[in-house]
Image (cartoon, coloured by chain):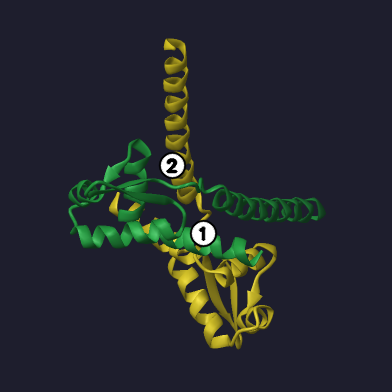
Chain colours: A yellow, B green
Amino acid sequence: MVQYSRKLDSTFGALADPIRRGILERLGKSDAGITELADAFDITPTGLKKHVGVLEEAGLVTTEKVGRVRRCSLGPRRLEDETAWIDEYRRTLEDRLDRLGEFLERTKEKR
Amino acid sequence: MVQYSRKLDSTFGALADPIRRGILERLGKSDAGITELADAFDITPTGLKKHVGVLEEAGLVTTEKVGRVRRCSLGPRRLEDETAWIDEYRRTLEDRLDRLGEFLERTKEKR
């Protein structure tokens, strides 16, 4: 449970940045090198590497040194737990709205 | 687009903490006061207020002063955009896996 919770912390944290979400969208199409990604997002390779580090930490990206280039590709995580958490939360909200609706119906009947 | 992106930043950032996710789950059941929430999560009211501030900033929680108590309830945001982003990302991944599968099939046929 604690481990599940930590995983959600690092993934949601990793997703809380437009460049990091952009990197994931870009790598969804094909693998890419650090310089290529830095150019695409108009930031320095050092800045790009930091973002990739956060994504790697969260298991969303993996990197591999190929000759002189570091290739980035999507990691093993597929955001299943994050989807599950959001779905569960939205279900709670809908249940609550349903109960509110029923309450209003009953109030109307009594009038 | 930039505004949409900023909204995702603040929501994913707000979700990147177990206490903040816990507060949302708790408020999904019913509204609650600051002291009540602080007791439930075993932190100081000051610490709790900071977390509520982050959730309020992201539109996930609203607070209202009722007499001497500050009541917290769920805000207007329902995480639709966050779900949409994650869904779109997972779709990209599935497309890519499908293409990889087709490629492997074709390679097998040639053998």
Tag on residue B4? none
The quarter of the displayed image where residue A69 is located: bottom right
Residue B69 lies left or right of residue B7; in this view the side is: left
Q: Secondary structure at mark 1?
A: loop
Left or right of B25 on screen, residue A45: right
Task: Identify the residue under disc 1.
Answer: A76
How far apart are the two marked residues, 2 and 1, measured between alpha carbons?
25 Å
Tell me which residue sits at (28%, 43%) in the image. B32
Q: Answer yes or no: is residue B42 visible.
A: yes
Instruction: Indicate the quadrant containing the N terminus of chain B: top left, top right, bottom left or bottom right.
Output: bottom right
From the image, tell me which residue sits under label 2. A89
Tell me where residue A110 appears, x and y as whole percent: 42, 11
Image-based side of B32 in relation to B5, left or right: left
Q: Nearer the viewer, residue A98 or A8?
A: A98
Residue sitting at x 42%, y 31%: A96
Q: Chain of mark 2?
A: A
Depth check: give the residue in front, B91 or A22: A22
From the top left corner, tell me how far across and down residue B12 is, in percent.
47, 59
Q: Amino acid at mark 1?
A: Pro
Dot 2: element: helix
